[in-house]
Amino acid sequence: MKSIITGIVLSLVWTWGYGQNPNPVLENYIRIGLENNLALQQKVASFEKSLEVLNQARAYYLPAISFNARYSIASGGRKIEFPIGDLLNPVYSTLNSLTGSSQFPQVENQDFYFLRPEEQETKLELIQPIFNPAIVYNYKISKQISNVQKADMDAYRRQLVADIKTAYFSYMKTLKLQELVEETRALLEENIRVNKSLFHNDKVTIDVVYRSEAELSKLEQNEAVIFKNIQMAASWFNYLLNRPFNTSIDVQEDVAMVHEADSLLVAEELAIENREELKQLEFAKRVAEFELKMNQSNAAPKLFAAVNYGIQGVNYSMTAEDDYFLGSLVLRWDLFRGLENRSKIRQSRIQLEQIKTKKAEVADQIKLEVNEAYYNLLAASKYVDAVRNEKESSEKAFAVIQRKYAEGMVTLIEFIDSRTTMTTASANYIIAQFEYRIMEAEYERAKGNFELPLANQ
């Protein structure tokens, strides 16, 4: 039943959009940006660092082998009194009395220092974990943290693709506006020439010439602004690609737009499936789950094997009496640590619930982004159609006014007004086309359906 309803909804949703054929120039710039962008390189470094942390966590499974050498010289310190005289002298006295001899001499009490004057110990030590849940969960946590870093890197890569497309289309928009200015300049210069000719033939007054020249000056002011916008757009685009700001930019004319079917419901599903922000939170949730299990496992005993082999004695020598071997099984079981672990378990549970709530919030935010991008693109597509019609109508109207002006049938004010209307409509059409492209790039990012190239890692 649900699938039937979904099918009906999809069939009723108005499908729209303009799909672009592949643009090799732009695709190449995206590749360069993904390879060279400085901010992305920092994200890549963070991901690579997380991989090394993962290797470090894996190393805890292996035995640790260390070489230790100690040579000590001691003097003084604690003294051990051994009352051997007090113990043996009464016995010796009795034996001497019984035997009538003195073959059992009296013995003095002995004192021994706890520290030997000289001592050395040289050994190899091997420690191998046998049962330690913390090592297992630490590895799993490190792996998920690495996944979080990769998702963060991919999220930035996706945003970078959208930024590069936006910068590219913004640059192309300024170039097209510059072309329009040049076309308008030619038109105004021709108008000045015609008006001067009419003035010299006493057909118009000098104010007509002045007004035409003022229109040209106004155009030159706009031209200066557009030139600045071109430079800034080029600088921003090259910045994203980590190139010198004055590097020339290749452009490719847009191919014909074609309709492609799409729907808001499908776009939302794509975003929930593809967006790296949700993947990050999913991996973060797994980190919290493993941290909870690790804290719960702290109540379990831990078992290690330890092996020592070496030599020890007063002096360094390698005789059979000097070397030794010691093997041990070490069991550690923390029975009570002031309720510290109980608090850690509670913290882990709270953190896990926070991440679950955050994930639900981010999912709603992503759907909101998709909705906004969807309707922005819908409005942009309608605006393109509207300004195209306005541009075509204004061009036809200006052709008529221009012919009438040449015949003296309309005033200069009417001519200038018609020309301004046509120029404005043409500029609006240029802006609308590239704003649509920019909205399209944002919609693509919001859906998360742009297939990112495989990272080097």
Image (tube, rainbow, N blue to C red):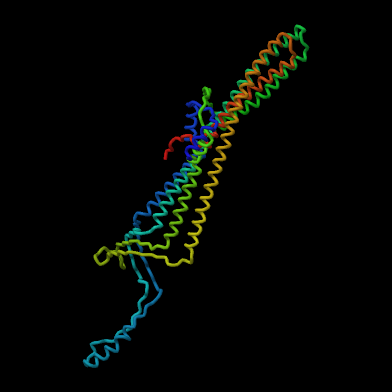
- Quadrant showing the C terminus: top left
Q: 321 and 14: which one is in front?
A: 14
Q: Is residue 157 visible?
A: no
Residue 86: image location, x then y, percent: 33, 86
Q: From the top left corner, tell me how far across and down residue 340 is, in percent.
A: 48, 63
Q: Is residue 292 above or below residue 455?
A: below
Identity of the residue furthest to the top in this view? 201
Place of residue 302 in the rendered image (x, y in percent of width and height, measured from the top left) = 38, 62
For the residue pair 269 and 94, the one nearer the viewer reads as 269
Residue 177's quadrant in the figure? top right
Residue in the image at 60% along x and 20% along y: 179
Judging depth in this view, the residue of 131 and 347 nearest the camera is: 347
The percent coordinates of residue 34 (x first, y second) are 48, 35
Res. 370 image quadrant: top right
- Residue at the location (74% across, 12% down)? 410
Q: Nearer the viewer, residue 261 or 13?
A: 13
**Left or right of residue 354: residue 386:** right
The residue depicted at 48 percent of the width and 67 percent of the height is: 338
